[in-house]
Image (cartoon, rainbow, N blue to C red):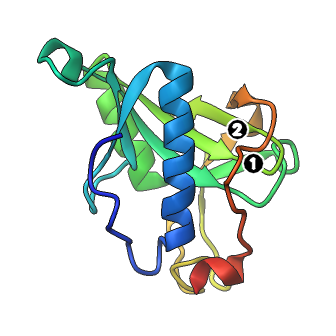
Amino acid sequence: MYGSYNTIRAGVENSTDRSNELIIASLLEHLWQCKMEKQPKFSTFDFMALKGDVGSFKDRQIKAFVEIRCLNNRLKQYPYIFINLKKLIEARMIEATTDTACLYVVQFIDVLAYCRLNKKLPLIKGCHGWKRRTGPNDNDELGLIPIEEFKIITDQATDGVVHQTSTQARQ
């Protein structure tokens, strides 16, 4: 893996998130035969998946932008998974103008799964009082990804990934 792993986005990300992302990215490198490169602090996505060995120019081809999340629920526990509208818009622009996929990889309690972010989705407005890391007044617009869109990568929890409660995540 490549990139800076020492940056934590206050209020949004903690050290457990960073550790979980690195564990999952390492697994994806192995399963997808790519190099996962951590994106800079204010990038839309967590990682880029690069083709093969990154030693030569042609192997610097970006195969996918990857957003990684860990959720405290089972894959089929809820009918939808949320994604921030800004990430969704960025993904649609990238997918519409390049041959590069944008993927949302989610570690559920029971499986690791992903979906492409290339479809039109219904939107909702976040509600005041939701248990969000960025605080109870954060009410961004959220895309609703139907759970059926997710494809299973591994049918088990990823070793080493720690699932947190909302309270733990805010600390």
**For this rendering, which residue is in front, 89 or 9?**
9
Amino acid marked by disc 2: Leu
> Is residue 131 found left or right of 139 in the rendered image?
right
Q: Secondary structure at mark 1?
A: loop
* Res. 118 in view: no
Tell me the quadrant of the picture where the N terminus can be found: top left
Q: Residue at x 56, y 35 (%)?
A: 27
Return the mark for residue 17.
none
> Is residue 46 found left or right of 141 in the rendered image?
left
Residue 126 placed where, x, y %?
60, 69
For the residues bearing labels 2 and 1, Cβ distance under 8 angstroms: yes
Above or below, 4 relative to 27: below
Return the mark for residue 108.
1
> Is residue 34 found left or right of 148 in the rendered image?
left
**For this rendering, which residue is in front, 69 or 146?**
69
Above or below, 136 relative to 169: below
Q: Residue at x 49, y 50 (%)?
A: 22
Q: CA–CA distance between discs 2 and 1?
A: 6 Å
